[in-house]
Image (tube, grey):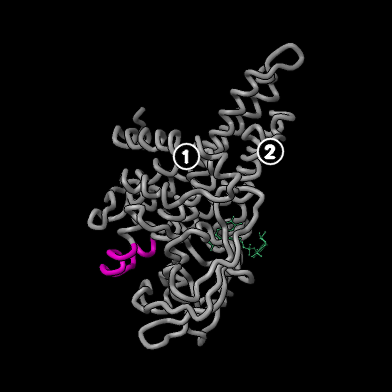
Amino acid sequence: MSSIYFNDEHDSLRQLVRNFVETEINPRAEEWEAAGIFPARELFKKLGDLGLLGLTYPEKYGGGGVDYWYQTVFLEEIGRAESAGAALGIAVQTDMATPALAEHGTEAQKEKFLRPAIAGDAVFAIAVSEPDAGSDVAAIRTRAVPDGNDYLINGSKMWITNGAQADYLTLLARTDDGGGGFRGMSLIIVPTDAPGVGVSRKLDKLGYRSSDTAILTFEDARVSQANRIGPEGMGFMLQMRQFQVERLSGSLMTAAMLDKVVQRTIAYTRERRAFGKPLIENQWIYFKLSELLTEIEALRQLNYHCVRRLVAGQDMTREASMAKLKAGRLARQVTDTCLQFHGGMGYVEEYPMARYFRDARLISIGGGADEVMLGIIAKYAGILPGR
Ligand SMILES: Cc1cc2nc3c(=O)[nH]c(=O)nc-3n(C[C@H](O)[C@H](O)[C@H](O)COP(=O)(O)OP(=O)(O)OC[C@H]3O[C@@H](n4cnc5c(N)ncnc54)[C@H](O)[C@@H]3O)c2cc1C
């Protein structure tokens, strides 16, 4: 089904990833939801063996060396998985914790850290948020103080996806208190087996239950300064850039997930009868579902516009912020409407609709809340003069 965006190679990749999701993820989704974690090491190794964890990364380190349209296909198919938690964990590995390393890491760093990430031999997490600093990234307090050739790291990180099982953290820490605010931060690769790095607890969440989300602590954790990505003090800037890929990846997965939810609702309302006819034959229902499909298509096209800019090497901050905002809002609208059309079956855990509804709520919060996206959009639009 080649289209203006995708050729036969993309279609083959889509089929490969779809098969993987249907055989390796979906049959175990409920088990992982109940366990509150998915086996990242086992799953990532299988994905790595298929060459799926670094499609856009250089072949030199085991990557695929192809452009982001291939990653788009990958994320759309992963986004349809029944375990949203596993899907998120995978995207953390490919699109949230490793882009800065791939773009700004040294040869030695890429050999040591990017190669195992691509092979599925190491699990990565991105550690930015803290108990007292989520939306306001410039307020983080975790400090990495130079000590000989090392940093001594103290502080804590909160909400860290893959946090309970990661081998490496891409950590944003304050390396110089001089300037305060966004100045003086660095991105550092932290091995979780370094003495002083600990998981204080795994969080119990409304949705994405198969994803392990942890609070991490650092008590005089010693990490080599050779693990810093880019020059000292550039961490905030590198992370802001990395956030754009994170937000786009989230939006791509969300559009695919929402399409699946509507398709399942169409199937359900065709089967379910009330007042002597299938539910779907009520104009209110098929109009509403058609409207949602239109909104999802609009989101998909905005996503593709971001991909076009990314592949062309252009800044997509404005567009990725809009896509992330739209994805969060639409996720709530689609799952709420579709749950309603399932009646009581939408409210019980025996049917996946309740899970979709719970999972969807994260999208307006994680990766930057809706309001943070609105702030960025306002800035790009020059709505408030001088800011
Ligand atoms: C399941 C899950 C997984 C996550 N995974 C990761 C991860 O892997 N790595 C990581 O670093 N972080 C992760 N996060 C953290 C996430 O990025 C933050 O939760 C998010 O940025 C919001 O920060 P906060 O929770 O501290 O909310 P706060 O900053 O306390 O904000 C609370 C609310 O206030 C409102 N608000 C904030 N700022 C403004 C403003 N300027 N104007 C108007 N309203 C505003 C928003 O509605 C916001 O939701 C995850 C979070 C969750 C829930």
Determine the residue positioned at 46% across, 58% down.
244
| Neighbours of disc 1 within 10 Å: few (<14), some (14-19), many (20+) | many
Circle 1 is placed at which residue position? 25
Residue type at the position of mark 2: Asp
User: Quadrant of the rendered structure where residue 296 is?
Assistant: top right
The quadrant the C terminus occupies is: bottom right
Res. 298 in view: no
Q: Position of residue 127 (x, y in %)?
A: 50, 66
Residue 324, image x, y percentages: 54, 51
- Residues 350 and 35: in front is 35
Asked whether residue 83 appears in the rendered view, the answer is: yes
Quadrant of the picture in which ligand 1 is shown:
bottom right
Residue behind mark 2:
336
Which quadrant of the figure has residue 189?
bottom left
Q: Residue 50 at x, y = what percent?
A: 32, 43
Residue farthest left in this picture? 60
Which residue corresponds to the image point at 58% horizontal and 51% vertical from the top-left? 325
Toward the top, the furthest residue is 276
In terms of image quadrants, where is residue 369?
Answer: bottom right
> Nearer the viewer's eye, disc 2 or disc 1?
1
Residue 110 colored magenta?
Answer: yes
